[in-house]
Image: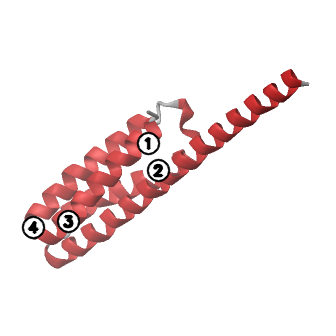
Amino acid sequence: MSTRFLTNGIIALAGGFLVVASQAFVSSTTGWLAFGIGIGILAITCLAQADPSRGLVQRGIDGIVAIVSAWTIIASAVFDSATLKWLTTAESLALVALAVAGLTYNELREQAAVRESAGAERDELLRAAA
């Protein structure tokens, strides 16, 4: 399992939870949840940069995720009431969308590797048969 899949999956689940929590709980609870989840996502994203196989596209997605999660931390400390509720909902939806984009990129990259491997194997079999 690649770290790209693992980190994007965690971000998607945490963002999805935060979307639901922002609509289900009062603003003070939503603020603390957004603060904690924002810190967790920022930490995961920063730690994942140690993996050299992440690639340029995934690192770009990670950068945007880091910016959104940093803003989530700031917004959860600054805003309250309905403003916090809707900002948290929007930030969480953005995190989910970015995670889905990362998961899609990971899948496309894996499929390309499988096709390349299958093509090399087929070429080798054709050379052996000739």
Q: Residues within 10 Å of mark 1 (few under 14, many from 20)?
A: some
Q: Residues within 10 Å of mark 3 (few under 14, many from 20)?
A: few
Give the SS element for disc 1. Answer: helix
- Disc 1 to disc 4, how far (Cα)? 30 Å
- Disc 4 to disc 2, how far (Cα)? 29 Å
Disc on the earlier residue, 3 or 1: 1
Residue wearing tag 1: 5
Disc on the earlier residue, 2 or 3: 3
Q: Where is residue 32 shown, x and y percent of the image?
A: 14, 56
Residue wearing tag 4: 25
Q: Where is residue 86 shown, x and y percent of the image?
A: 24, 75
Give the SS element for disc 3. Answer: helix
Disc on the earlier residue, 1 or 4: 1
Residue wearing tag 3: 20
Q: Nearer the viewer, mark 4 or mark 3?
A: 3
Q: At x 17% / y 78%, what residue is drawn?
A: 82
Residue 26 lies, with reference to residue 36, above or below; the image says below
Residue wearing tag 2: 103
